[in-house]
Amino acid sequence: MSAKFASIAAVLLALTASTALAQTKDTLTIDLPNDAATLDPHLQWNTDSYTIYRNIFDNLLTRDAKGEIVPQIAKSWKYLDDKTIEFQIRDDVTFQDGSKLTAEDVAFSINRIIDPKLKSPQLSQFDQIDKAEATSPTVVKMTTKSAYPALLAQLVKLSIVPKVYVEKVGDQEFNLKPLGSGPYKMTNWQKGVQTELEAYSSYWRTKPPFQHVVFRTVPDVSTRIADLKTGKADLIREVPPDQAESIKSDANSQVLSVPTERIGYLFINAQAGATKDVRVRQAIAYAIDRQGLVDALLEGYGKPVEVLGAEPVFGYTDKVKGYDYDLDKAKELVKEAGAEGATVEFLTSPAYSRATVEAIQQMVNEAGLNVTISSSDQATFLKRRQGDPANAGGLAFGAWSCACQDTDGVIFPLFRTGSIWAKYSNPKFDEAVDKARVILDQNERLKLYEQAYEVLRDDVPGIGLYQAYALYGANKKLHWTPTANEAMFVTDMSWQQ
Amino acid sequence: MLRYAVERLIQAIIAIFGVLTIVFVVMHLSGDPTLLLVPQDASAEMIAALRHQLGFDRPIWVQYLDYLQGLAHFDFGVSVVQRVPAIDIVLSRVPYTVMLAAGALVVAIGLGIPAGILMATKRGGWLERLLTAIVVTGQSVPTFLSGIVLIFVFGVTLRWLPTSGSGDFASLIMPSIALGAISMSTFARMTRISIIDELGKDYVRAGRARGLSLGAVVVRHVLRNASIPVITIAALEIGNLLAGAVIIETVFAWPGIGQLAIQSIQSRDFLVVQVIVLLISFVYVLTSVLADFVYALVDPRIRLVR
């Protein structure tokens, strides 16, 4: 009898021990393709950098799981007039050195990023802001140069930095030893190797789920997958669709995927070459089998779209239809335009999927055009693509996300007359997107974007191909729901046996 | 001797200066990092403003003079991408590169030279055929493939070695083998050829005639004479190993100079690239000078004078 009790006790003990073990997963390891360029959140804005530093800093505003803009450091806000907005700042937030976060820090953060002396690459995202001032320890008043409805969406990207600390140590030191009010503080940054974070125990919002987080730099995708399978990494970013099966076949790993606001699109030059003729552009749109692209190249991790937009983006409409795949019509239009056999240059760089580019090339060739692919490195590609229309090629593939979930960040930079990406100009389109940019009434804005999408459908300076899905590889014990804006907040994750 | 050293030094400075200038001009003519730094929705004015702030709108010769002026004060500039002094970024990677090159050299010499000796002395046998097969494989399998195969076999399937990383000795083993394999083949081939060359000479026959075994002749006499071309190769290979590990470093997430060089070129991080170029050309020059001295050490007939 006592032996039986002993064995039951032993089993119970083992059980509690194992659950205790499960609850205290100490270190979460995440493999990223690149190291952070800077950990000063006001300098570089690229995925690998902000994936790390947004766990160190809090933002003025943030987005909830549904993509709505919600308070974070700002408790609430109200417009005093079209150009003036007042934010109420939380008074229960401390930086990781224990000092209190006040309205002064918020005003400092805004004024710092718009100061040309910082030479911040992010300046253009905040250049509509005129200035910010703290009117009390918990109130910040911000003025914009004109009425600017996308302001809140942009402020989601603004990290709050500690004024006293930054001024004391200087910009260069702050970049190497960042200090924020976020859930994790940086303990060690081995450049090119890994960034180690430790939970900030007095974090105001929640208890950080892991005591330590390590972001490793692993450039090769096969190596990231090997790390995941052997348990060296718990979560890996940037898994190409054709590798998803290999992760699924592993007993301890899972694929996490989510539809994002990123849109695969095809740029068509409306101002030079054979594609200057709208019939040729329409023919190209008819020649592309979007569902085919999704099935064959994305293995289903994507969804064909009718317009250059996606559901999680404000301003998206399902009322405007695109061009259904119709090769006969495409051939007819090419013939009508007298463009049979015309050469169309397809610009690309190694940053874009070669398979996708070649598939599109083949589809367009079938319509009777002659597409040639010109591949160069990213810097040269951008120089041509954003430069003079005559030298910008006829076609280019891209995957656009403004991480702002607002159409203003999508079709305005892509097609507005004078924008670096636009090889197209139509006053009707410009009027709609200009107006949508400066009015605050959301219903009115929706209508304007619908009009803009109609103009784009008729003129075809580019077409939306598909809504891309983000793919992550994760340990099966990791619980996490990735979001449409491709953010990676450790506080949204947990570990379960 | 002193005159020789001074001459070599002047040659070296001219060579390094030339390389730096060429790289500077080519990099700047192919665009600047501004377009890669700005967010995608930046306007043309914003891009122009940032370009101006970063100083890339100045004429190239002004930028060049500015750069040289900094160099004269040992100021290598600040990376526009990372906002950290370029020299610090590069120096933090040097230990990893040296470690990996040393590991690869141990593999290359430790396996390559004995294999070359065996191939030269056991000609026509099964051992030579086997070794030839291994050498050809080492030479011809591309490193991105051998790296992934090693990871799959020893990392994922057998779980003997870590799949990536740079923290401990175990993680050095696979990249050293993958990187060392190609050099190993070079060493094996060079050793084989120069030993066969020597074996046909009179002193070998004389040694055999005195009753020495082939092994004794090879160890006591041939190796020393056959080592000159091998040393030349070694000097070049050290340069290659330090500079050419780009793919291996990427596959194994090894944070060396090669990986940094590629990333810096892609992101047009000029000043970091310049420091790397400076470092690599310095290493090449240094190893070739060292090789000259080692020749003299090994073979007293070679004098460092003209």
Image (cartoon, coloured by chain):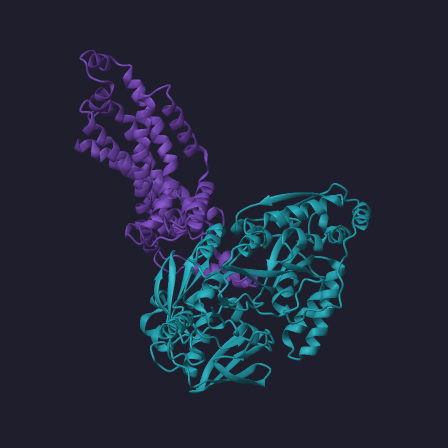
Position above or below: A290 against B303? below
Horizontal and vertical percent position of residue A217 = 42, 56
Please tell me in which quadrant of the rendered image residue B8 appears.
Answer: top left
The colour assigned to chain A within the rendered structure: cyan
In this view of the protein, which residue sits in the foreground, A387 or A105?
A105
What residue appears at the point 38 percent right and 49 percent down from the top-left corner? B160
In the picture, measured across the screen, residue B296 lies left or right of residue A97, that is left
Q: Quadrant of the N terminus of chain A?
A: bottom left
In this view of the protein, which residue sits in the foreground, B31 or A166?
A166
Horizontal and vertical percent position of residue B211 = 19, 14
In this view of the protein, which residue sits in the foreground, A327 or B189?
B189
What residue appears at the point 67 percent right and 53 percent down from the top-left corner? A295
The colour assigned to chain B within the rendered structure: purple
In this view of the protein, which residue sits in the foreground, A466 or A171?
A466
Q: Is residue B61 visible?
A: no
In the picture, measured across the screen, residue A35 lies left or right of residue A71, that is left
Position above or below: A133 against B62? below
Q: Is residue A35 visible?
A: yes
What residue appears at the point 62 percent right and 70 percent down from the top-left corner? A406
In the picture, measured across the screen, residue A388 lies left or right of residue B159, that is right
In the picture, measured across the screen, residue B32 lies left or right of residue A240, that is left
Horizontal and vertical percent position of residue B56 = 45, 55
Q: Residue furthest front?
A: A1
Q: Residue furthest bottom?
A: A136
Position above or below: A179 against A468? below
